[in-house]
Image (cartoon, grey):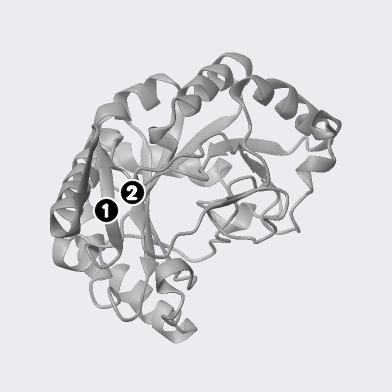
Amino acid sequence: MTSKKMSKFAHILKVHPCYNEKLHDKIGRVHLPVAPRCNIACRFCRRSIGKESCEKRPGVARHIMKPEEVEDYLRELLKKMPNLKVVGIAGPGDSLFNRETFETLEILKEKFPELTKCLSTNGLLLPRYARKLADLDVKTVTVTVNAVDPKILKDIVEWIYLDGEIYRGEEGAAILIKNQIEGVERAHDEGLVVKINSVLIPEINMDHLVEVAKTFKDIAHLQNIIPLIPLYKMKDLRPPTCEEIKKVREICEKYLPQFRACRQCRSDAVGLLSEKRLNIYDLKHFSH
C-alpha cells in the first residue's frame, strides 16, 4: 500500500468494527435496511423480508425502512447506544440499485456528520456512483466479488440486470466482473476504503479466490473470505470446512490483507458485533 492509502486504512481501523476485530466490543454499528431491490441473481442468495425473518445472515430484514424514518430511528438508537459510531447500508438488496440509498445518505450527511458511513454492493453500478458516494461522505465500500473469470462466475451468478436489459451466463458474468474492477478502481481513486467480500464455495471457486486477491491487490485494502451458507439453488452444496477457509485465507493473504472475524450480519443488524442483536423493533419508533 502507498503511504496515503495506508493512512486512510489506518483511520478506518480505529473506528470501524467490520475492519478491526478489536473493536467488536467497543464500537457499535447499525445497518439501515432501506434497499430492498437487487440487480443480480446469485444462486446462493435468498432474500427474506418480514416479521418471520429471524435468520442471522445477509439479505434478511424484518422491515424495509423508509428514508424519512431514518433520522428519528437513529436519534432514538443513539440514546440507547452512545457508542454507536458506524452506520451502513447493506441491503437487503443491492444498495446502489435503490434510490432510497442515496436519499438516506443525504440525510446522514446532513443530520449525522459525526457517524462513519459505509455501504455494501455487488459492484455492478459502482463505476457510475463511486464519485457520488464520496461526495455523500461514504468512507468505506464493501464489494462482493466471488470470481474474476466469467466461466466460473456464471455458475454463481445466474443473471444481471443493467439499464433495462437482462444478461445471462458468461455474458452477464463478464459485464459484472468488468464493472466490479472499474468500480473499485474509481472508488479507490475517490479516496474510499474498499473491502472485497468473497463467498467461498468449495465446489466452484475455492482454488480461484487467490485470483480475486491478485486482481484487487493494488486497489482494495482488505479481503473478507466468508463461507457459503447453502441456500436457494446452492442448498445442496456443502459449506467449506474451517481448515479450507484457513488455507484459502493464507494463500490470498500473500496479495491482500485478510479479515477473519466477519459475523455475516443481517441487513438490519444493530449493536456491538460481540453481543446478541438488539431487537430494534422494540424501539418506540417501530411500535406500530
Which of the two labelled residues, at mark 1 and mark 2, occupies the earlier sequence position?
Answer: 2
Residue 55 point in image, percent of width and height: 65, 61
Neighbourhood count class around disc 2 (C-alpha, 10 Å): few under 14, some 14–19, many 20 upward = many
Residue 209 point in image, percent of width and height: 27, 68
The residue pinned by badge 1 equals 159
Q: Eyeballing the image, is 66 above or below 212?
A: above
Q: Quadrant of residue 124?
A: top left
Question: Can see residue 1?
Answer: no
Q: Eyeballing the image, is 218 above or below 157?
A: above
Q: Quadrant of residue 8?
A: top left
Q: Which mark is residue 40?
A: 2
Residue in the picture at 31% in, 30% down: 130
Instruction: Give the alpha-carbon distance from disc 1 to disc 2, as whole Å.
Output: 6 Å
Residue at disc 2, secondary structure: strand
Q: Amino acid at mark 2?
A: Ile
Nearer to me, 61 or 88: 61
Nearer to me, 3 or 180: 180
Asked if disc 1 and disc 2 are in contact, CB closer than 8 Å, the reply is: yes
Question: Can see residue 9?
Answer: yes
